[in-house]
């Protein structure tokens, strides 16, 4: 395993380095990094509905979009991010449990008992300290997550516009009641820098990781330009009023919103957003919707939808479209 520690707090650079390592390294990679105040949305999320843009922009908080799915998160220098890149999980294997193990183990060595809860959260005493996300491509998985040490939780709550249905599904009333920092559980750790050193030491000793300097190359600069570009941050979407029908529902695997445009009785275009995690065939999902609307149910039933959105089955889409 190769271990990298970024000393930059620029979210666009850190995301660029992470993607470069994902696409170019053949070995397992573990990376620790921090961003200055940044609101980060998942690949398929709508910034306008997921963030309190007025608060974000007034506070001078950067906005970033990652290549993984999942929900919006808030980064500041009281938060530590980790990335684990390796061979994709086997069929039937819990990918999130496998890729979370090094950070769970490292925190356990420091005296903090962490549990993987739900689909992608790490919790302490029932409260969230980390949200993770993944992207799998060509047999490799990029897994990354936050780690709240001494983050400004009030700012986190104000910047993120979390769906009330999502909170209700977890039996809580607000973001602030759901999350917590782990600083009180680590009285011997004085600041994030010490936490980075402690986790790096554990990863090195337990996984035989070698600490290396981050690579520097034109491709990383190009990726950094992508991550900071308006086109990436605000992908072009038609106005809601331009669509004929809209469908939205929250499932255990995440929220899904589908917008359809019809010409007569034929679906001619579709848009999909949400905090779900993509399967490797996600880009082909829209094809399942296009065609005569009367045949939508049969088109859905013929598809292996788990290859498009992780955890989704045909019955879920039929429920979404009220075709049950």
Image (tube, rainbow, N blue to C red):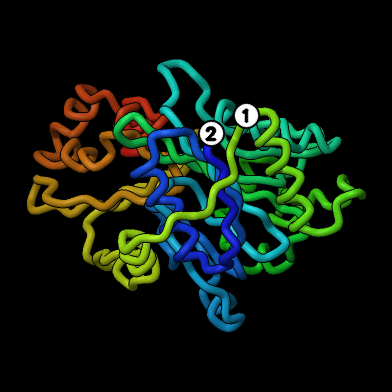
Q: How many marks?
A: 2
For image coordinates 48% across by 34% down, the residue present is 28
> Which mark is on residue 207?
1
Residue 204 % position (x, y):
66, 36
Mark 2 → mark 1, Cα distance in angstroms: 7 Å
Q: Is residue 165 visible?
A: no
Q: Disc 2 on helix, strand or loop?
A: loop
Based on the displayed image, in which of its 4 quarters is residue 46 positioned? bottom left
Q: Give the left or right position of residue 292, taking residue 75 as reference.
A: left
Mark positioned earlier in the residue sequence (2 or 1): 2
Residue 281 % position (x, y):
26, 34
For image coordinates 52% across by 23% down, the residue present is 94
Q: Give the left or right position of residue 52, taking residue 264 as reference.
A: right
Q: Is residue 142 above or below residue 270?
A: above
Q: Between residues 267 and 100, which one lies in front from this camera angle?
A: 100
Based on the displayed image, in which of its 4 quarters is residue 174 positioned? bottom right
Report if the CB atoms under discs 2 and 1 are less than 8 Å apart: yes
Q: Is residue 160 above or below residue 286?
A: below
Badge 1 crowding class, 10 Å Cα cut-off, few under 14, some 14 to 19, many 20 or more, is some
> Which mark is on residue 1?
2
Q: Between residues 31 and 52, which one lies in front from this camera angle?
A: 31
Which residue extends farthest right? 187
Q: Disc 1 on helix, strand or loop?
A: helix
Residue 59 % position (x, y):
61, 80
Based on the displayed image, in which of its 4 quarters is residue 210 positioned? top right
């Amino acid at each position: 395993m190769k271990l990298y520690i970024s000393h930059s707090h620029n979210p666009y650079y850190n995301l660029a380095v992470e993607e470069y390592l994902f696409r170019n390294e053949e070995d397992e990679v573990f990376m620790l990094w921090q961003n200055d105040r940044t609101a980060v949305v998942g690949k398929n999320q709508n910034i306008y509905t997921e963030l309190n843009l007025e608060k974000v922009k007034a506070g001078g908080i950067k906005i970033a979009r990652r290549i993984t799915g999942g929900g919006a998160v808030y980064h500041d220098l009281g938060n530590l991010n980790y990335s684990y890149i390796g061979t994709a999980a086997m069929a039937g294997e819990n990918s999130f449990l496998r890729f979370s193990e090094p950070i769970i183990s490292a925190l356990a060595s420091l005296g903090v008992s962490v549990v993987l809860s739900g689909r992608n959260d790490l919790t302490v005493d029932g409260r969230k300290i980390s949200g993770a996300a993944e992207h799998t491509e060509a047999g490799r998985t990029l897994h990354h997550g936050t780690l709240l040490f001494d983050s400004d939780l009030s700012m986190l709550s104000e910047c993120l516009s979390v769906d009330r249905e999502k909170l209700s599904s977890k039996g809580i009333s607000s973001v602030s009641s759901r999350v917590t920092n782990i600083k009180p559980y680590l009285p011997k750790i004085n600041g994030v820098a010490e936490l980075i050193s402690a986790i790096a030491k554990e990863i090195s000793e337990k996984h035989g990781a070698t600490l290396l300097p981050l690579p520097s190359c034109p491709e990383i600069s190009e990726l950094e330009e992508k991550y900071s570009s308006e086109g990436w941050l605000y992908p072009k979407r038609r106005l809601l009023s331009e669509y004929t029908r809209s469908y939205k529902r929250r499932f255990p695997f995440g929220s899904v919103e589908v917008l359809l445009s019809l010409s007569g009785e034929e679906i001619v275009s579709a848009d999909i957003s949400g905090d779900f995690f993509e399967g490797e065939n996600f880009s082909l999902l829209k094809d399942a919707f296009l065609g005569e609307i009367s045949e939508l149910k049969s088109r859905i039933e013929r598809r292996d939808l788990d290859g498009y959105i992780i955890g989704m089955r045909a019955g879920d889409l039929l429920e979404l479209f009220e075709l049950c």
